[in-house]
Amino acid sequence: MESIPKDGQTTMPDEINGRPVLHTPRGPVLTPCAPGSVLARLGDKWTILVISFLSLYPDKPMRFGVLRRGIPDISQRMLTLTLRNLERDGLVSRHYYPELPPRVEYELTERGRSMLEPLAGFTRWIRDTWQDIEASRRAYDEAEDRSTEIGEKTSRE
Amino acid sequence: MESIPKDGQTTMPDEINGRPVLHTPRGPVLTPCAPGSVLARLGDKWTILVISFLSLYPDKPMRFGVLRRGIPDISQRMLTLTLRNLERDGLVSRHYYPELPPRVEYELTERGRSMLEPLAGFTRWIRDTWQDIEASRRAYDEAEDRSTEIGEKTSRE
DNA sequence: CGGCATCCATGCGGATACTG
DNA sequence: CAGTATCCGCATGGATGCCG
């Protein structure tokens, strides 16, 4: 990412976004490795929301019910599953208090907190861009509608 | 993210990762908005890989076949779908040349390139952390196996 | 209160075959 | 070469009920 001169000539980095790149006669080949499995988890429906919510009070554990009520439309099941996966990844720690009624609290681990800054840089880009993206989507879908409703020729076929 | 003093007292930000936060008597409530739809797309199985691969030569269009061969295990169908979605989001542009055989080239748009830096910060964190995360997963799964195979008491129940 | 079990709908994504 | 069409398995995730 750091080796992109502006003169139109590109170098050939042998690593991109943490993935090794092989250079073959037929073109570069991306060597897949583990980051995908992490991204897949982070990209699921609720994970980022839960992390964001926990980061509201990075130093104070939060009860299950507070999370449940704080994240609109999340089901109890998905909240449990999401927290369990985050715990498994060492990003969230769980504290169980066998009282009556029982109390369970969650908080970001050190590793979880270390993710906040890089994540924030990325979500900032999303926050600044998503309106444009959604506008592009609408434009794209409209254009698609117009072309299919008359059977107009598209450059796609 | 910028209002977290280290003294144990937290302020109450009314925005986190681009999402508005309401403060109610029962606790904070996250107001969901569109960034989720963008993250969901970016988090799918192939999108980041395709973007990463295109970013190898940010100033030169890339042929479909080069992408196909460069990204291991991606099917023709999923590559087409992923590229179509990226085009729809205005992150990738498509250039069709009606020759024989036909040639189609793809490249990142300006918007697509604007994503590279924030994304790099995040993938850097992933690259530096994923081994630890996978180690945590293994440890977690092992502990789970040990506890279930004897019916040992866990604090979960 | 927290969370596990169960059932079930939906859609993502893979395999294959066929067109311009 | 690039793309579409079809079929299908499977994981995701929602709804409900029960248990400590």
Image: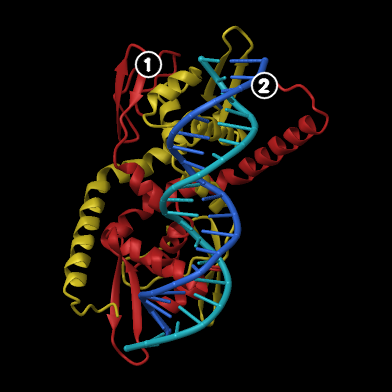
Chain colours: A yellow, B red, C cyan, D blue
Return the x and y of residue B98 as percentages of the image width and height.
28, 87
Q: To which chain does the residue with label 1 belong?
A: B
Q: In this view, does B93 lie to the left or right of B147?
A: left
Q: Residue at x 66, y 23 (%)?
A: B156
Gap in angstroms between the C-alphas marked 1 and 2: 26 Å
Q: Where B53 sits versus B155, above or below?
A: below
Q: Badge 2 is on which residue?
A: B157
Q: Which of B56 and A11 is in front in this view?
A: B56
**Circle 2: residue type:** Glu
Q: In this view, does D8 lie to the left or right of B104?
A: right
Q: Badge 1 is on which residue?
A: B27
Return the x and y of residue B20 as percentages of the image width and height.
28, 29
Farthest residue to the right: give it.
B150
Which of the 4 quarters of the picture holds residue A152? bottom left
Mark 1 vs mark 2: tell me if same chain.
Answer: yes
Q: Which of B5 and A115 is in front in this view?
A: A115
Q: Residue at x 49, y 56 (%)?
A: B45
| Quarter in which the C terminus of chain A is drawn | bottom left
Q: How many marks can you see?
A: 2
Return the x and y of residue A85 as percentages of the image width and height.
58, 36
Q: Nearer the viewer, residue A146 or A54?
A: A146
- Asked if one can make out residue A62 in the rendered structure from this viewpoint, the answer is yes
Secondary structure of residue under mark 2: loop
